[in-house]
Amino acid sequence: MITLRHGEGRPTWAFVIVSVPRGNLRGVVDDVKSGRMTDSEDGPDLTEDGPEDSPAERAAAGDRPLVVVENVNKHFGELHVLRDINLTVDPGEVVVVIGPSGGGKSTLCRSINRLEPIDSGTILVDGKELPEEGKELARLRADVGMVFQAFNLFAHKTILENVTLGPVKVRKQGKQESEKHAMELLDRVGIGDQAHKYPAQLSGGQQQRAAIARSLAMKPKVMLFDEPTSALDPEMVNEVLDVMTGLAREGMTMIVVTHEMGFARRAAQKVVFMSDGQIVEENTPEEFFTNARTERAKDFLSKILTH
Ligand SMILES: Nc1ncnc2c1ncn2[C@@H]1O[C@H](COP(=O)(O)OP(=O)(O)OP(=O)(O)O)[C@@H](O)[C@H]1O
Ligand SMILES: [Mg+2]
């Protein structure tokens, strides 16, 4: 905890921000706003700004989480697949989304990336709503990297070509610069030596790491992972999780749909439990896995823990 003392001038926001553990920033801002951290009489009075702004308003004002999902609803025909979803993700925060099959986890990810339109509510990424279509959508969508269960690499392009395609086409980067960056990324995920092979010549774990490198090449602000390890043979799961843990440690903002509890415990600040289109519970990984509050979460955990 940070104490702001008398006689040291006005505390600066920079001081507050650099001193905060990753993922706790919003708590500190709330502490400051509620007066719990302003013991200086001549310090800034942050307690008189009236009622709390909504996350969408705060995001638009620049004091913001990186991803805001507010009152989002979506139907597939009769099926109410997202029911009034509210979720915020701070810069550098890692959120694990967990829950039974059909609960809406993939639909939520796809909605954040605008691969699925929503019926009502707001989704902001870095303060901006993604437009419905057009070039602007392609550019803003590139701010959100997405890694799927099926790696979705282009089969007729080499790994290197897969990674450079987006930067060249969407980010309008030069070929040489893109290739240099792509090689750095492929080295970083441990498959630099596979750059000139085609996807079918790689193992599943290597293909998924190539897919991660391809997303990173777009310099996304946030990465969404939808069950990135569930199609992999068990011995390849860890090599992908290790890359993801490394990204989390480096401060990448991440939303990860996974049932890998070790990863959640190691890398996430928050676990969101989704069932029947609703966020039923939101907690720290430790609390969620040892002390879930709701019956639905307890029931789900008892099933995955016995596997
Ligand atoms: N394109 C679609 N058209 C109609 N229904 C859909 C479509 N996509 C998903 N659904 C339905 O919406 C519900 C939520 O699906 P979603 O894929 O988001 O669940 P999930 O939590 O990701 O499940 P899983 O753990 O099996 O991946 C399911 O009942 C699914 O059948
Ligand atoms: Mg899914």
Image (tube, helix red, strand yellow):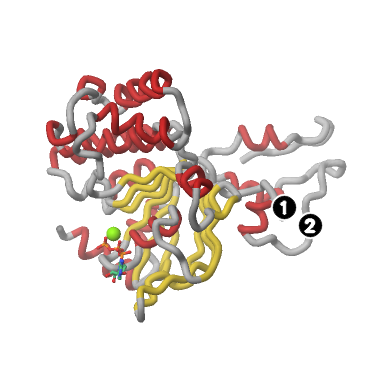
> Residue 187 sits in which quadrant?
top left
Is label 1 in a helix, a strand or a loop?
helix
* 129 on left or right of 115: right
Q: Position of residue 151 (x, y in %)?
A: 24, 44
Please rate how many residues cluster around mark 1, counting C-alpha atoms within 10 Å: few if below 14, some from 14 to 19, many from 20.
some
**Rendering coords of residue 200 (x, y %):** 13, 36
In the rendered structure, are the residues bearing label 2 and label 1 in contact, judged by CB atoms less than 8 Å apart?
A: yes
Sequence-first tag of 2 and 1: 1
Indicate the quadrant where residue 277 lies: bottom left
The extreme bottom residue here reads 78
Say which amino acid is labelled 2: Asp
Tag shown at residue 33 = 1
Q: Residue placed at 40% from the left, 61% from the top?
A: 116
In the displayed structure image, the side of residue 56 where residue 90 appears, left or right: left
Which label was assigned to residue 124?
none
Q: Nearer the viewer, residue 170 or 182?
A: 170
Position of 20 relative to 293 (above/below) = above
The answer to whether residue 71 is left or right of residue 7 is: left
**Is 241 located above or below residue 63 in the figure?**
above
Residue 120 in the image, given as x and y percentages of width and height: 52, 70
Name the residue that disc number 2 marks: 49
118 up-or-down from 245: above or below: below
Position of the N terminus by quadrant: top right
The residue located at (37%, 72%) in the rendering is 81
Q: Quadrant of ligand 1?
A: bottom left
Disc 2 versus disc 1: nearer the observer: 2
